Image (cartoon, grey):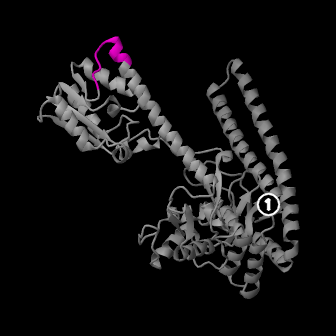
Amino acid sequence: MIGIYVRVSTEEQSKKGYSVENQRDECKKKAGTNEVLEYIDKGYSGEFLERPALDKLRKDVKEGIITKVVCYDPDRLSRKLMNALIIDDEFRKRGVEMVYVSGEFAQTPEGQLFYSMRGAISEFEKAKINERMSSGRKRKAREGKVVKNNFIYGYDYDKEKGALFINEAEASTVRLIFDLFTKADSPVKGINGIAKYLTDKGVPTKRGAAVWHRQVVRQILLNETYTGVLYQNKWNTEGMLANKYKTDDKVRMKKRDKKEWIATKVPQIISEEQFQYAQDLIKQSRRRWAKQGMNEYLLSGLVRCGKCNNTMTGVKRKNWGSYNFMYTDRKNYSGAKFSGCGLAVRCDKLDHVVWEEVKRLLDNPEMYQNHKEEKESSFDTERLGVIENEIKKAKNGRKKLMQLFALDDIDTEEIKESIVELKRKEEQLKVELEELKQRINEMKSSETNQAIIQEAVEFYLKNDMSDFTTRKNLIRTLVKEIIVEDKENVYIKFF
């Protein structure tokens, strides 16, 4: 049976006349009959071999259904020379006659050379097309134009002008999302709460859907475009076109080096200060908006042990017939990576210390930045030395254990477990060390967030601070983290 293979991409169909109908007619004419099986890949790039019709043709050739294949040109099989040669050779080895409308390619050295030259030229042409398109997009981006419609919520895209314009209805929702996430008087909790709030209010998404998902809200909160700058050429998508033909081993989108990004000015919706504050909150959102327990704690999700780095959660403990509420770093649940060092402090005492410090700063807002830099610099520098010392101890401990392997009558399994434990501890400390160094650098380069301070002061003055929830919301607006070294030494980190 004769099979004809036809492939056309959208670009070729519109610009070069390689229409499906034209190729089909020419192939049938070359075959000399209309009694053929048609294998048509419409809208598929010749850059990749994973194509439905081509896969079916290769399967039918393997099963002996097809004995002759007619194709308009070798570049219909593939734009890449090597792939085209592989397919052609695969078919010929199974005794299939290969016929091309554009020319005869005999099984001679001369025919193979000509075939290779045609394939190489076709591959070169495809590469040049891609290069010209990429260069053209970069040039337009450097000229300040937006080259692609990414359907960013809050904006409309004008293709003719190459620009983004604010969609006021959507932009007001963007501002609402950031306010709900960052304001002390927000009626909802966390990203999930915002998604539910928008769904309940009947606000449509960009695509007109009635339901908001947390990931959509999170993407909006992470999108720096709202501050007035769109970074183009940020992502490397090379090879991703073939993903729609694959079920596994898909190519992932990679972020390019920041030097290659092209910054384009767009209308601003959110202030830089509010955006950066939201990013800080997002980094801590998992513990800040964790599932509500049976009892409420004023500093829930903010307290961390300064010795073992475990988060400290509120617990209710019975002691001599009475109940005490404590913050502890002890993790007893199944699957906990680190059990903690056992540090525990009474809730009422730690709550009082933190609240008094917050009040002191709100009563004297001009002290905020000096206090913040002084406290954080002192603690972070001290902590930096402690971590570096712990890493050295872990390394030395592993070296000593390795030397014990040479001795007899030693439980090697126990030594191995100890080495693995020390290695795990060392890796954990290295991660913490890098985070701490980054935090120190950010603190040195950051400017005072006066807008957040002013909002906190206004909230403090006009609300009843005897209310537990109001007080808790205010603390979470200003306080990033509370580090407890021991019962006497507490460090409060402000935003």
In the image, what residue occupies the spot 31% across and 20% down? 89
In the image, what residue occupies the spot 29% across and 20% down? 105
| Residue in front for this viewpoint, 102 or 315 | 102
* Residue 326: image location, x then y, percent: 70, 66
* Residue 270: image location, x then y, percent: 65, 70
In the image, what residue occupies the spot 69% across and 54% down? 310
| Residue in front for this viewpoint, 168 or 373 | 168
Asked if residue 480 is among those painted magenta in the image, a careful observer would answer no
Location of residue 480 (image quadrant): bottom right
| Quadrant into which the C terminus falls | bottom right
Magenta-drawn segment: 103-113
Q: Is residue 461 above or below residue 6?
A: below
Furthest toward the top, the residue is: 109
* Residue 316: image location, x then y, percent: 64, 68
Left or right of residue 14: residue 435: right
| Residue in front for this viewpoint, 473 or 346 | 473
Left or right of residue 28: residue 18: right
Circle 1 sits on which residue? 446
Q: Residues within 10 Å of mark 1 (few under 14, many from 20)?
A: few
Left or right of residue 378: residue 119: left
Q: Is residue 78 above or below residue 290?
A: above
Left or right of residue 438: residue 366: right
